[in-house]
Image (tube, rainbow, N blue to C red):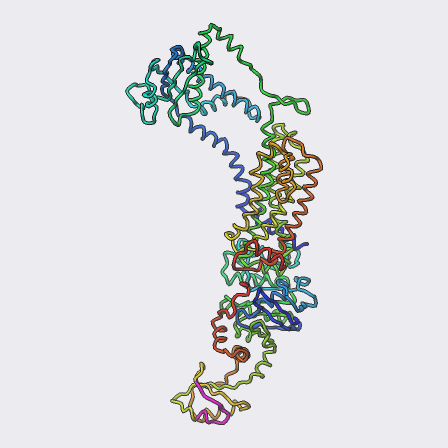
Amino acid sequence: MTSVRKTFGTKVAVEGIDLELPEGSLYGFIGPNGAGKTTSIRMIMSILFPDSGELEVLGKKSAVESKDRIGYLPEERGVYRKMKVLSFLMHMGRLKGLGGGAKLRDHCMTWLDRVELADVAKKKCEELSKGMQQKVQFIACIVHDPDLLILDEPFSGLDPVNMRLLRDLIREQHEAGKTVIFSTHVMQQAEQLCDHIVMIHEGKKVLDATLDEIRTRHDPRTIAFSPLNGLDRGLVSSLAGVESVDDGEHGVEAHLAHGADPGGVMRAILAATPVSRIEIRRPTLEDVFIEIASGRDGDAARLREALRGGHDVAGEEEQA
Amino acid sequence: MSKILQIARREFVSTALTKGFIIGAIIVPLIFMAAMPLIIWLTMLAEAPKVEGELAVIDRSGQVVGTLQEYVDTRIARDREQIAEQMEKSQELTGAMGPGGAAQGEQALDMVLGEDPEIVVHDLGAEGDEEGAKAALRPGEGEGGGEGLGSRLGLAVIDANAVRKGEDDEAFGAFQLFVRPKLDDRVIDSMRDALREAVRQGRYREYDYDPAFMDALTSVNAPNTREITETGEERASTQIFTMMLPFAFMILLMISVMIGGQYLLTTTIEEKSSRVVELLLSAASPMQLMTGKILGQMGVGLSLLLMYSGLGIASLVYFSLGDVLDVWDVVYLFVFFLLAYTMIASLLAAVGSAVNDVREAQSLQTPVMMVMILPYILWMPVTRDPNALWVTILSFIPPVSPFMMMMRMTSSQDVPWWQPPIAVAISAVGAYCCIWFAAKVFRVGLLMYGKPPNVRTLIKWVRMA
């Protein structure tokens, strides 16, 4: 993607995003709701077309020419309610260029078996639970063995067991050499799965790095602990390398000065006061995101709220 | 191409091979056909109660009432005969009169007419009280009254000069018949005819003419009109078919276009509202999706058209009326179906893609539906004068063009040979424009949720796409 821009009416959904995804990588698109993730993905899929800028997908000028090599799980997804599960999958397979009757049927059944849905193959889609439908949709998206997988919020609405099943399937695709892009507004999911993170905020790319790079760049600067007895804050804050002490959401948090050695400070705290628990707080993606985004508009609390509650920062894109 | 065919295939299978469709499109019309005699029978049954009552007469001429009862009785009998004759005639026309038909006819007649009405003439005298007698006709009066004659059905006031013209009269007098409300019109007719007959016979007597000779003199008994066919055969006039044929063709065209189009609208809305559409768009382009859907539902409409027109043609041939059909009309029926369907369906696909649910589709769908209703409303005037200027003009304006031209071609007058091909050409251009418009709306509309658009928004989308 090169300086891609898309507007809906007066609202700018995506503003000048540059992005390059190497083949075989596992990319996470993160950002709060309404940040422009779905719009970007739809443009990659050639469902929407950018107002300006250029796109190249699998070496082609547009995804239209390589649709059969892409598997796409949209965020706004559905199934034909009256259609039987197996017929639906076979229909999607044929649309994706797979031929053959019995062979295609076997192929679909194998996949249904993998996600433990073989027994509902003859049922109508509307009889399935939402989680089951979602697994069916996932099969519909990879049934033609695509080289590029684009998953828009694949985990939303799944229980932990199915979430793990889906995560394993995605990992498996990645290990088979497929390129995977998935978007989520739940940062932990990206953290667990991706090796590369792209962060989008208000239509702009604010971060594009591997998980390791992010961790080293945003090195641990907080030590959280739970003191056993009463705490003499003055004592802790006077320790070498400690900048300030306050009550955070993980207990008492000692923020380290720039360049301080976290191990040394930890030992000093242990020597100063007995604790029931002490840990070095590694920054989560959420922290990183808030650090980056709040640096731009300085409203960390609002952003944290948006990420947690998942309510819209900028409204539905389609409402334009 | 294979994607389009796969989409079309799913569209056809999921529409035409469902219980609902088969019941709706095939079984319901069959039930209607089977139920038709039953419905007719039931309607007739409802009219069957025996009519009994008196006909009061104030005969100012004094020369009619004496013979009236006789004529009332013969009249009722003769009316019955006439109805029987008419029924026979209509049966001959439709060819439904098989062996044993006569006996069936008699039975049917009993069902239609019920028992003969019994009307008793009640003479109120030449100087009878007209106002008082009228009052007795009011509903609720006279029923079960003391006279023991049942209810009073009517009052006839016969003029003094009805039978003999006075010196100064320009013409004969006549009679005035008053009846109670809601009386079966067959009973009224019988009373009127009997009165007329009684007056006429009175005049013959008065002026000394032989009634039998006069009857023979005034009656001209011409047999039914017969048609000579191309092969020289004779048969009853098929005039009713020449009226019905354009209607049948237009209705066939309308039903198959409408059903295909409606299904297209609902499946598009369903795909959009169930959010399956984005999954589809990841596999096929909007244009492929729309083309596939239109083709699939075209198959549905075409199957209906084939089935219904096949049935129609088969029954015409069975009753050896096959020659009222021109082969070219049938060929054009299918050509016009393709064109009319493409126009209507692509517009409906655009509507379906633009709205969120069926309810929202109503207002956008109305103009399209109006186009379909127009030929239906214009059926009568068009068949009367199929080459009128306004009809000719309408038959060249898409999207009504196919319907109008079809009606003109199947009506009794010939359409100039060059007009149908031109209508086809214009409609083809119209179809192309509709697809062009629909494709643009379809592409934008499919992923738009929220406020239902109006026509102005649609035009904006067309400019945008």
Residue furthest left in the image: B146
Give the magenta part as a residue range.
A235-246
Residue furthest front in the image: B168
Quadrant of residue B196 within the rendered picture: top left
- State whether residue A281 is above or below residue B233: below
Q: Position of residue A61 (x, y in %)?
A: 69, 66
Q: Position of residue A233 (x, y in %)?
A: 42, 90
The answer, for residue A86, to whether it is visible in the render is no
Q: Position of residue B440 (x, y in %)?
A: 63, 56
The answer, for residue A31, to whether it is visible in the render is yes
Foreground residue among B221 and A125: B221
Quadrant of residue B57 within the rendered picture: top left
Left or right: B412 in relation to B91: right
Q: Residue at x 67, y 49 (%)?
A: B432
- State whether residue A66 is above or below residue B355: below
Residue furthest top in the image: B208
All told, the count of numbered labels is 0
Foreground residue among A125 and A161: A125
Quadrant where the image shows the N terminus of chain B = bottom right
Q: Position of residue A10 (x, y in %)?
A: 57, 66
Quadrant where the image shows the C terminus of chain B = bottom right
- State whether residue B20 is above or below residue A310: above
Left or right: A251 in relation to B301: left
Quadrant of residue A202 within the rendered picture: bottom right
Residue A238 lies within the magenta run: yes
- State whether residue A120 is above or below residue B131: below
Left or right: B332 in relation to B189: right
Q: Residue at x 56, y 38 (%)?
A: B376
Residue B274 lies within the magenta run: no
